[in-house]
Image: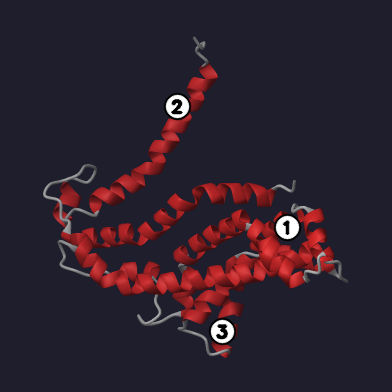
């Protein structure tokens, strides 16, 4: 029988409190999404009958076009970041060229610049390019900043690949692009999955940049549309919370199926070995 450990009991208690504090907002979100205004006021902390499941149907009818907008924007960010970071990471890991270290450190410096400092210059740039209120502005803006960390992770992973494997491919006559596409990228699926998940979260939850560069409903992402969910005075609050739940489902499903690859890829990309 294991002896009682005061330290273990303290750790367990602290973790339990943190777990409860973490899940309370999710609990409140779920139960409130089934309520009308009167139920929210009088029975705030607990579920209340009847459950107004229609909140979900009414909210979905209003926000589903914006869900597609967010899916398109998020997918575009992921694809662009992966193209940039895999090519750049492979070049930094495999080739020697003048200014390599300086260029790499300049890219890493982008991770230290607060996003708000770049907000106005980026806005002016996209305005001059005529890309305001388009999908392209919402894709290229976040992609530029996200590529720095992705390049660092993927470069570190590429440096850990077997050099003899890549050299044997060169001996067999494979060119750099073929080695990259048929050997390096397939072996790097864990870190590529990690970068994809990180940028999916970035793209789906990005609020400030779409707020700055979009107007109207044509290209508005779901995160902005949630504030415009409307209904009767008694129903609107429950509908808004139902909209929050609906908009979080894609990310929950993504993380549910990608947790293992996300953790293994992040560990492999952060530690050279």
Which residue matches tag 2?
13
- Residue 20: percent from the left, percent from the top? 38, 37
Return the mark for residue 158: 1
Residue at x-position 72% and y-position 62%: 108
Q: Quadrant of residue 233?
A: bottom left
Is 196 positioned to the left or the right of 159 in the image?
A: left
The correct choice, above or below, for 23 with respect to 101 in the image is above
Q: Secondary structure at mark 1?
A: helix
142, 190: nearer the viewer: 190
Color scheme of the displayed model: secondary structure
Q: CA distance from mark 2 to mark 3?
A: 51 Å
Q: Can the viewer see residue 122 in this picture?
A: yes
* Dot placed on the residue nearer the N-terminal end, 3 or 1: 3
Could you tell which of marks 2 and 1 lies nearer the N-terminus? Answer: 2
Task: Name the residue beneath numbered marker 3.
Answer: 126
Q: Measure the alpha-carbon separation of dots 2 and 1.
A: 41 Å
- Nearer the observer: mark 3 or 1; the answer is 1
Image position, residue 101 (x, y; %) = 83, 64
Q: Earlier in the sequence, mark 2 or mark 3?
A: 2
How many labels, in total? Answer: 3
The answer to whether the residues at label 3 and label 1 have Cβ atoms under 8 Å apart is no
């Amino acid at each position: 029988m294991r002896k009682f450990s005061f330290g273990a009991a303290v750790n367990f208690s602290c973790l339990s409190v943190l777990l409860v504090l973490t899940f309370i907002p999710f609990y409140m979100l779920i139960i409130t999404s089934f309520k009308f205004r009167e139920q929210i006021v009088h029975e705030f902390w607990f579920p209340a009958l009847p459950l107004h499941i229609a909140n979900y149907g009414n909210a979905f009818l209003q926000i589903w076009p914006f869900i597609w907008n967010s899916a398109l924007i998020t997918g575009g960010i992921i694809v662009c970041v992966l193209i940039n970071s895999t090519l750049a990471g492979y070049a930094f890991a495999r080739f020697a060229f003048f200014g390599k270290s300086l260029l790499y450190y300049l890219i890493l410096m982008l991770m230290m610049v607060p996003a708000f400092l770049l907000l106005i210059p980026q806005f002016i740039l996209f305005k001059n390019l005529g890309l305001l209120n388009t999908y392209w502005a919402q894709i290229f803006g976040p992609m530029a900043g996200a590529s720095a960390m992705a390049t660092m992770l993927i470069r570190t992973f590429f440096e850990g690949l077997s050099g003899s494997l890549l050299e044997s491919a060169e001996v067999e006559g494979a060119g750099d692009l073929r080695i990259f596409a048929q050997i390096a990228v397939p072996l790097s699926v864990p870190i590529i999955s990690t970068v994809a998940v990180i940028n999916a979260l970035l793209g789906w939850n990005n609020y400030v940049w779409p707020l700055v560069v979009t107007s109207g409903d044509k290209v508005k992402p779901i995160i902005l549309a949630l504030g415009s969910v409307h209904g009767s005075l008694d129903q609107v609050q429950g509908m808004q919370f139902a909209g929050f739940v609906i908009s979080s489902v894609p990310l929950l499903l993504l993380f549910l199926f990608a947790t293992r690859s996300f953790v293994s890829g992040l560990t492999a990309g952060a530690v050279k070995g």
